[in-house]
Image (cartoon, rainbow, N blue to C red):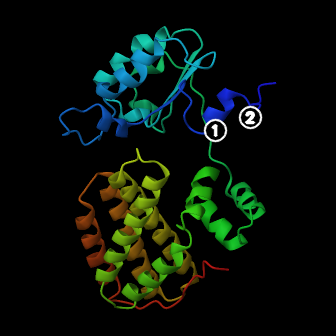
Amino acid sequence: DGEPCGTCESCRVFAAGTHPDYHVITKELIRFHDKTGKSKGIDLSIHVLRPELIEPAGRKAALGRGKVFIIEQAELMNAQAQNSILKTLEEPAGRTLIILLTDQPGVLLPTVRSRCQTIRFTALPIERITNELIKRGHAPAIAHNAAELSEGSLGEAIRWLEDGIIASALDLTTQLNAVLAGGPATELGDWFKKSADDYAEKQLARDELSSKDQAARQANALYLRLAANYLRKRLAMVDDADHGESICAAIDAIVRAETFLDGNVNVALVFQQLGIALEKSSRDARVEETCDYSK
C-alpha cells in the first residue's frame, strides 16, 4: 500500500538515518572531499557531486530495491557541477530517484530543468499552521507567531519552537524597546550575535554536517524578520505621526540589514550599521507601546 512497515531492516536503518541507499547531498559535504582544506563550501561543486551522486548512482542498491538521492539547495550548483550531472539525470540506473530541491529553479541551467519533472510546493496558510501547532500543545498566540514567521512551512515552525526561537522574541522585544527609547544599540548587536551562536550550536548538535556560519546567518535573518514583524505590530498601535515615522525608519533599517545579509556582507558590519540607524530613528520620537508574544 506504499506505507512503511516500520519493522523490516530497510525501515529500521532509514529511521536510524543510516540507510545505504538514501543519500542527502549538501554543500557542507565538501569537508570530506576537499584535500586542500581551503574550500569554504559556498557552492555545491563537482568535487561533492562526483563521489556523492554520479559514482554511487551507477552502482547497484546495497539494501533496498532502488536508490534515492536528494540534492539540497540545488541552486548552489555551479555551472560545471550542473553540466557534470546531465548524463546521470538523463539516464539514471534502474530504480534510481534523483530529487533536486530549490526555491530558485530559474538559476538551474535549462539543460538541467529539461531533464527534471517540476513539482511545486506552495506555502501552507498561516491559519492551518497555527491550528496544527495548537493541536501540538502550543499557546494560540505563540502558535500564530511561529506560523507567521515560517512563511508557510509547518516543519520550520515546529523546529523554531523546539529550538526556542519564538521564546527568544520576548528578549528581542525588550532589546528593541530599549534602543527605541533612546538606549545604546551595542547590547542589541551583542544579543543578535549570542542568539545566532546559540541557534547555530543547536543545528550542529542536530546535524554535524551543517555549517555553523550558515546556521548563524539563518538565525540572524530570522531574528531580523521577527524584529520587523514586532515593529509592524507596534506601528499599528501608534496614533502619533512622529512616533509612526520613527518606527517606519526602524523597519526600513531592518529591511536594509536583511538585504545586506542576503548579499553576504560582513555580519558584524551589518549590525553595526543597523544599530546606528536604530539609534538615529529614536532621536525624533520615543515609542513605549509593546506587543506581548507570551499570551
**Camera-nearest residue between 207 and 273:** 207
Q: Is 31 situated left or right of 9 in this image?
A: left
**Residue at point 46% right, 36% down?**
72
Q: Residue 275 placed where, x, y %?
A: 29, 77
| SS of the residue under disc 2 | loop
Q: Which residue is the site of mark 2?
A: 6
Q: Is residue 187 visible?
A: yes
Q: Which residue is the site of mark 1?
A: 15
| SS of the residue under disc 1 | helix
User: Within 10 Å of the Cα at label 2, are there few (<14), some (14-19), or many (20+) other Cα atoms?
Assistant: few
**Residue at point 55% right, 18% down?**
62
Whether residues under marks 2 and 1 lie with C-beta atoms below 8 angstroms apart, the answer is yes
Q: Residue 149 placed where, x, y %?
A: 56, 61
Q: Is 169 situated left or right of 109 in this image?
A: right
User: Within 10 Å of the Cα at label 1, are there few (<14), some (14-19), or many (20+) other Cα atoms?
Assistant: few
Quadrant into which the N terminus falls: top right
Q: Which mark is residue 39?
A: none
Q: Residue 145 placed where, x, y %?
A: 61, 67
Instruction: Give the alpha-carbon distance from disc 2 to disc 1, as whole Å.
Output: 8 Å
User: Going from the N terminus, do you reach mark 2 or mark 1 first?
Assistant: 2
Report the amino acid beneath label 2. Answer: Gly
Q: Using the image, determine if residue 295 lies above or below residue 195.
A: below
Quarter of the image for residue 36 reads top left
**Camera-nearest residue between 274 and 44:** 44
**Camera-nearest residue between 276 and 141:** 141
**Camera-nearest residue between 182 and 47:** 47
**Residue at point 71% right, 72% down?**
139
Report the amino acid beneath label 1. Answer: Ala
**Residue at point 43% right, 37% down?**
73
